[in-house]
Amino acid sequence: MAKHIVDGHRMRKRFGQNFLSDPNIISQITFAIRPKEGQHIVEIGPGQGAITEDMVASGATVTAIELDRDLIPWLKVKFERNANFSILNQDALKTDYAEIAAGKQVRVVGNLPYNISTPIIFHLLEQAEHIEDMHFMLQKEVVDRMAAGPGDNNYGRLSVMTQYGCEVDGLFVVPPESFNPPPKVDSAIVRLRPRKEKLALDSHEYFEHIVREAFSQRRKTLKNTLKKIIKPLGQPDLGVDLSLRPENLSVEDYVNISNTLYRLSK
Ligand code: SAM
């Protein structure tokens, strides 16, 4: 649905288009990323180039991925005279980041479309061995959930799955008035650094299943939520107190539970 018109471009709500317009925030983001010549930056959703400009000026190689084809000619005119810039008109959810990395490591940045930010991050985590780090603008509430530790109200499935794959740092909050049009919620910048040495998992799929089940009813004890899985396996000792609620277990606890149950289920 085209709603606003900026620089002749019809802004599309379905593409999550809230363009950054506050130069101070843009500088803070660049400062947090510190792009350098010799690095390869992949920017998801350059939009009208708010973040792109500093990335290109740093001398780093910049590959931008933009789904809205109406923005492509404009981005080409603005940036393509720089030999270090290229743009792909495609969906970041379907992008093969290993192919873009071409045997090296990339740094991923983006003010993500909020409606699909979590699927984009999960898609990237599947290809994390090609990624040095990621800096994203997300809804603040999503950053709070990603960064939360055990015992925190915000600690949940997103925290466990993100922290299993990455070190997570919530950096700073960005208010709605820093965008055009302003989103309805506060935003925040997060830095994700894929772990080079992850806790060993027998099955990633099974781990996802256990974490999803555990948090399916946050108010209940693990004994209750995992009953369906544990009972047929003979009530094994999982090395954790099952009278706890899911928010009280660490990522390592979930890895151990998942490995034990997976082995017994084979
Ligand atoms: N980076 C710009 C800024 O900060 O002003 C734009 C950010 S805007 C929140 C999100 C951008 O992602 C838009 O340009 C939108 O067209 C683009 N986008 C939406 N869905 C996308 C997808 N699946 N793949 C790539 N880009 C997408």
Image (tube, rainbow, N blue to C red):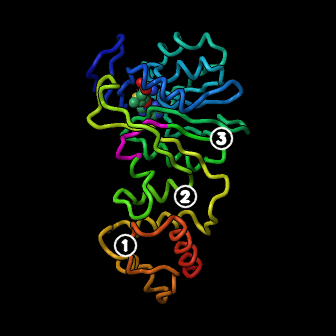
Is disc 3 surrounded by few (<14), some (14 to 19) or many (20+) residues within 10 Å? Answer: some
Amino acid, disc 3? Ala
- Verify CB contact (< 8 Å) between mark 1 and mark 2: no
The x, y position of residue 19, in whole percent, is 38, 24
Look at mark 2 in the image and give the residue it sits on.
164
The answer for how far apart the CA atoms under marks 3 and 1 are is: 38 Å
Look at mark 1 in the image and give the residue it sits on.
245
Amino acid, disc 1? Arg
Sequence-earlier tag: 1 or 2: 2
The x, y position of residue 18, in whole percent, is 35, 27
> In the picture shown, does residue 100 fall above or below 148?
above
Please, what secondary structure does the residue beneath circle 3 have?
A: helix
Front position among marks 3 and 2: 2
Can residue 68 be seen by looking at this rendering?
Answer: no
Please, what secondary structure does the residue beneath circle 2 have?
A: helix
The answer for how far apart the CA atoms under marks 3 and 2 are is: 20 Å
The residue shown at (30%, 26%) is 177
Q: Quadrant of ligand 1?
A: top left
| Segment tinted magenta in the rendering | 136-143
Q: Please tell me which residue lies in front, 104 or 156.
A: 156
Q: Please tell me which residue lies in front, 125 or 179.
A: 179
The x, y position of residue 112, in whole percent, is 43, 35
The residue shown at (42%, 59%) is 157
Sequence-earlier tag: 3 or 1: 3
> In the picture shown, does residue 118 fall above or below 86?
below
Q: Residue furthest bottom?
A: 234
Sequence-earlier tag: 3 or 2: 3
Amino acid, disc 2? Tyr
Q: Is mark 3 within 8 Å of ligand 1?
A: no
For the image, the number of numbered tags is: 3
